[in-house]
Image: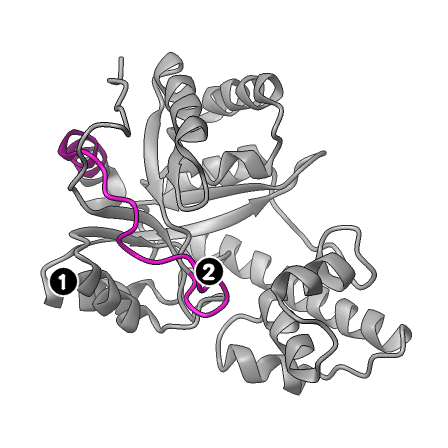
Amino acid sequence: MLPLINPLTPQNAMIDLHIHSTASDGSFSPREVAHLGKAAGLTVMALTDHDAASGVADFLDETQRLGILGIPGIELSAEVPFGQLHLVGLGFNYKDPTLQAKFEKMLNGREARNEAMLQAFQDNGIDLTLAEVKAFAGEDLVSRVHFAQALIQRGLVADLAEAFEKYLGKGALCYRDRFRYTPQQCIEMITAAGGMVIMAHPLSLTTDWKTLESTIIAYKALGLRGIECFYSTYDTETTLTLLRIAKRHNLLPSVASDFHGAPKPTIHLGQLPVSVELKTLLTDTLLALPGMQ
């Protein structure tokens, strides 16, 4: 059984297994993220961009140069009947051609959704253009965050929260769905490539603890290896409850800032120091993965 790691005890080990870059909707390049991690005192960090591993090679090259253990990662959005389920894949062989083809299918789904959302804006009298949105994404993946930034620039909304509430969130005026793999498919594709899967920010799925735990049990049967217990917006009570769930079901308690840079300015790297015991447990597990060999 895994030990129950108490967040109330002194913490000083620096690890972060959920970070975004410009390869999806972050504001810093993969190499810049590595430098920010170094400055924040991180010694183990994973790049986990949305549905894409295109930034991993540069990230790993820079973390190695800086003396940091870099972990290849990705954050996958899975198709579920309620809430939002994001799964973080870690330690997989990001060069695996079968895996790359599956990632490409997700990216194509994003592109189709973006076109549908642009049409929805136009249908509702807002002549938003792809050029405006892409100005915030550069050459990288275009996400709803970039749509939100374009809306803010136009003065149509005050911030990201209002953009998602009015236009971009699930069920909002201009939201359009996209292709997603099932939870089982997400877990299987990462596991087949030598990695492991962690449930990201579990309360995004549901805030009903009984439903959440029963869902976690079901996903563990599919190969889920852990849940994010230490998360940048979770209070101590939430963290302790998630730690108890992780312990009951012998799941890894992961550490996740969900850093994006400018899109989430209150979230910083290095704000989640944990015990040496937990850092060692996570690091040893990652280094033993086939995809890390």
Q: Nearer the viewer, residue 69 or 91?
A: 69
The answer, for residue 175, to whether it is visible in the render is no
Q: Is residue 276 magenta?
A: yes
- The residue drawn where x is 19% and y is 39% is 283
- The residue drawn where x is 43% and y is 25% is 242
| 158 relative to 3, above or below | below
Number of numbered labels in the structure image: 2
The circle drawn on residue 118 is none
**Residue 259 in picture, x, y percent from top left:** 40, 57
Q: Is residue 6 left or right of residue 75?
A: left
Q: Is residue 158 magenta?
A: no
Q: CA distance from mark 1 to mark 2?
A: 21 Å
Among the 4 quarters of the image, the one containing residue 239? top left
Q: Amino acid at mark 2?
A: Ala
- Which type of secondary structure does the marked residue at label 2 adopt? loop
- Which type of secondary structure does the marked residue at label 1 adopt? helix
Quarter of the picture holding the N terminus: top left
- The residue drawn where x is 25% and y is 52% is 45
Q: Amino acid at mark 1?
A: Gln
Q: Nearer the viewer, residue 130 or 167?
A: 167
Q: Is residue 289 left or right of residue 174?
A: left
Residue at the spot of label 1:
64
Judged by its main secondary structure, the magenta piece is: loop
Q: Which span is picked out in magenta?
A: 260-284
Residue at the spot of label 2:
52
Q: Is residue 138 left or right of residue 82?
A: left
Quarter of the picture holding the C terminus: top left
